[in-house]
Structures are given as structure tokens and as C-alpha cells.
Amino acid sequence: MVPRRVVFNAGDLLLEGMLHSTSEEAARGAIVCHPHPQFGGDMNNNVVVAVARALPEKDFMTLRFNFRGVGGSQGVHAGGEKEGDDVLAAIAYLQPMVTKLFLIGYSFGALVGLRAALQSPEVKGWVAIAPPIGFYDFSYLKTCPKPKLLLAGKEDPFCPAQGITTLYESLQEPKSICLIPDTDHFFWGKETILAQEVVSFLKKL
């Protein structure tokens, strides 16, 4: 499976992405949002790539893309202020190709991606990987009725296990949580385990 480079519009900007699929008729799709670009995050991040590659084996089409100002995407980084528009543009791009759409956000990608997922009826469920709950308020997720998975490393200082467990307990059903032992915010060496958890959750929806 060789991913295909794509470009799509986000307002006046062109954003670049990579589309993964084993079939042109994949029934389900997932958008994977990358971590903070000011700390080296882009669509080629280890976690983003692992998830984007794993889902097509279960007949998903996945889109990973660079936010504005990252890599070959036009524009400048907006600190999360406008990146939600990029997520909505990615949703508009992928949605016509699939019958059911999900969103996966990693760290900063969860921060901006989940806001878009909540306001988009096209998104039928979401996965938050290591959301930076130590720095941002995610309490707005409490009202979301969509299926959801919270996933974090047990040693993550930016998404503490107790904090994400408390957030999980406040959320509406249906919901799932997975804490991966012996890893932190970056999941080095645990990418396959993480990707399998995401696949296992989404393939049931």
C-alpha cells in the first residue's frame, strides 16, 4: 500500500496530505491530526504514520495532513486559532469518498481536531491520543454523545493517567479508555500497540 499525495483547499490556502487506502471503495474513513508543529510535529510523526497505515488493513481510508504553515501546506502557524478550519477542510475533502467518517487527534491534533469533530455532524466518532490536558481545558467534551476513545501512555507528564481517567469518567457513553504502560507522550517503540488499540475501537463502530 503506497500512500498518495493529495492537496485540498482550506479557505484560500492549499494544504498537503497523504491518502492511505487499499481500495478506492473503502466504506469508512479517518482523518489523523498531527502534534504541535512548534515542537516538530507534522504528518510524518511516528504516531500519525502508524495509525494512518494500520487502519487501511481493515478497509479504512485514512488522511493525514499538514496543518497550515507546516511542510508543503500554505499559510502560517496560528497557534490553534485557525487550525480548526484546516480540520474542517480535511473533513470536507474526505467525507464524499466514504460512508462513515472518524477523527483521530494526537496531542495538539486532539486539541484542535476534537473541537472540529464536535461541530461536524459528518464525524461519527473520535479518538484522542495523549490530549494535553495538563495545559488546556477539555471539559467541553462532556456534552459529546459520539463514540469516543481516550488513549495515553501511563508515564505521560503532559497527559497524566489520573487526569485523563478523571476526564473519561466525566464523559457520556459510549466511551472507552486505554492507558499503555511503560511509555510517555511520544510512544516510542509502542506505535504498533497504540495503532492496534485505535483499529480495535474504530472497527466496531
Image: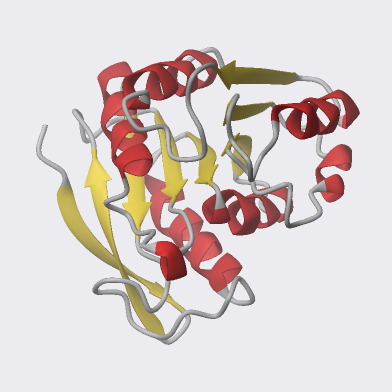
Q: Which residue is the extreme one toward the left?
A: 2
Give whichever of 61, 148 is nearer the camera: 148
Above or below, 48 against 170 in this view is below
Name the quadrant containing residue 190: top left
Q: How many marks?
A: 0
Name the colour scheme. Answer: secondary structure
Left of 77 or right of it: where is 4?
Answer: left
Q: Could you tell me which residue is drawn at 26 percent across and 20 percent down?
A: 57
The percent coordinates of residue 203 (x first, y second) are: 47, 16
Locate the N terminus and report the quarter of the image it occupies: top left
Residue 117, horizontal then vertical, whole percent: 65, 49
Pick the quarter of the image with the C terminus: top right
Rendering quarter of residue 137: bottom right
Residue 125 horizontal/vertical position (percent): 62, 33
Question: Residue at 24% of width from left, 52% of height from top?
Answer: 18
In the image, residue 93 lies at what x, y percent? 40, 58
Which residue is at a point 43% across and 64% down the rendered structure image? Answer: 39
Taking 45 as reference, is 159 above or below it? above
Left or right for 145, reference 104? right
Q: Nearer the viewer, residue 79 or 60?
A: 79
Q: Residue at x 73, y 21 (%)?
A: 175
Viewer-nearest residue: 98 or 137:
137
